[in-house]
């Protein structure tokens, strides 16, 4: 008796052999929109996702996919503008991070509804980091929105989340590509989606966007309200610098801050040694962010050595900045293109395998 082909959504191609997929979705801020594009291509080609583990943005996208609400998330993300993002990030001076992010979680809750992880139709794990114990924490039960909130708490940017006496932050701190939680999933194929891929063309050169320009104006306005030294003291803090850097804005140099009468001072002549043509000019927090990216890439490689993936999809770090959440359309498209390329290669290898010899009775 013949076995019917496994067929995906209307208009999709039949799924190839080994169509049950377990997904590990990595951390990387707004680059996590690429996860949406990857999942869309898998669905269109008839693959069945039977297990998901995610860190940070990977936990958010993975949880929404496990709840069957990915289309709603994609449409909402595509509608976001730069100014909408600034309102949703909910800045706070007193929080243990400059952004509370509760407004974003409210929007995600509207999409998800009051779901628990146990109610999801497929196994799902959100990975967070216990800041006090220095260990990874796996959420495999309990409220889905709480698991996502804990996993997306970017250090120094989004305030940590307290759960059962534990202070939890971004899962990517210790586990930027969570392969271990899907090791026991009954799947034919494991796919890892890393958001810390190498920059094939070198660092992306880009002009500051509207958000960066808006933040720069806000910084200069703040400086005009205070004594210049006091303004710089307020803005020259790790959390403030981190957010400015992630949006592509910058802290003004002391000699360009307005003086007590609100008059800008002229820049001094720069030393010729600062204009070395062969090296990028990195500020202190560019160095910090770059260091974090390198550390997460190294952690991901160690994870893959212990838990190899059948298919690795790497999203370059230059795809977008960590907090450019207004770029969903471009980043989802990048995820689709990378997934299509990787699956084309995988499926062509599958087609090239010789057929098993017939067993005659």
Image (spheres, rainbow, N blue to C red):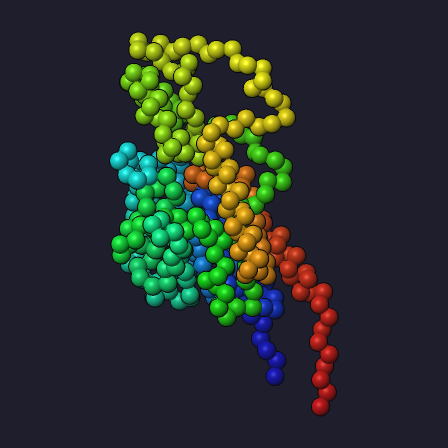
**Camera sees residue 87:** no
**Percent position of residue 99, x then y:** 33, 38
Residue 171 in sight: yes
Looking at the image, is 203 positioned above or below residue 333? above
Quadrant in which residue 122 is drawn: bottom left
Quarter that holds the N terminus: bottom right
With respect to residue 109, does 216 lie above or below?
above
Q: Position of residue 337 (x, y in %)?
A: 58, 48
262 lies left or right of 51: left
Q: Position of residue 316 (x, y in %)?
A: 56, 43
Is 223 left, or right, of 213 in this rendering? Answer: left
Residue at image point 42% right, 65% down: 123
Q: Quadrant of residue 98?
A: top left
Quarter of the view holding residue 2: bottom right
Q: Nearer the viewer, residue 50 or 14?
A: 50
- Residues 197 and 41: in front is 197
Residue name at image x 51 percent, y 44 percent: 295
- Residue at 28 percent across and 51 percent down: it is 162
Q: At x 39% / y 40%, what residue is drawn?
A: 80
Residue sticking out furthest to the front: 133
- 4 vs 306, nearest the viewer: 306
Percent position (x, y) of residue 42? 54, 59
Quadrant into which the C terminus falls: bottom right
């Amino acid at each position: 008796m013949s076995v019917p082909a496994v067929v995906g959504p209307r208009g999709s191609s039949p799924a190839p052999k080994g169509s049950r997929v377990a997904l590990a979705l990595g951390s990387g801020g707004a680059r996590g929109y690429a996860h949406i594009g990857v999942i869309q291509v898998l669905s269109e080609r008839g693959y069945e996702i039977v297990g998901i583990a995610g860190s940070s943005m990977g936990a958010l996208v993975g949880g929404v996919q496990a709840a069957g609400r990915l289309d709603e998330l994609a449409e909402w993300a595509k509608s976001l503008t730069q100014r909408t993002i600034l309102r949703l990030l909910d800045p706070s001076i007193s929080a243990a991070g400059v952004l509370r992010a509760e407004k974003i979680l409210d929007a995600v809750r509207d999409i998800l509804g009051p779901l628990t992880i146990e109610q999801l139709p497929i196994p799902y794990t959100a990975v967070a980091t216990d800041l006090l114990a220095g260990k990874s924490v796996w959420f495999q039960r309990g409220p889905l929105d709480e698991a996502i909130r804990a996993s997306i708490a970017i250090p120094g940017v989004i305030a940590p989340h307290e759960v059962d006496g534990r202070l939890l932050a971004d899962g990517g701190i210790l586990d930027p590509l969570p392969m271990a939680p899907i090791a026991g999933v009954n799947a034919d194929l494991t796919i890892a989606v890393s958001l810390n891929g190498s920059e094939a063309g070198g660092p992306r050169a880009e002009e500051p966007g509207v958000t960066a320009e808006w933040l720069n104006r806000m910084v200069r306005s703040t400086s005009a309200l205070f004594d210049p030294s006091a303004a710089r003291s307020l803005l020259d803090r790790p959390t403030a610098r981190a957010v400015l850097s992630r949006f592509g804005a910058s802290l003004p140099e002391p000699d360009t801050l307005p003086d007590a009468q609100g008059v800008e001072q002229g820049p001094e002549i720069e030393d010729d040694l600062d204009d070395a043509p062969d090296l990028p000019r990195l500020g202190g927090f560019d160095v910090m962010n770059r260091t974090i990216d390198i550390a997460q890439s190294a952690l991901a490689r160690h994870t893959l050595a212990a838990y190899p993936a059948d298919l690795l999809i790497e999203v370059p770090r230059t795809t977008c900045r960590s907090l450019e959440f207004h770029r969903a359309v471009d980043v989802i498209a990048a995820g689709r293109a990378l997934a299509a390329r990787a699956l084309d290669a995988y499926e062509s290898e599958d087609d090239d395998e010789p057929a098993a010899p017939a067993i005659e009775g």
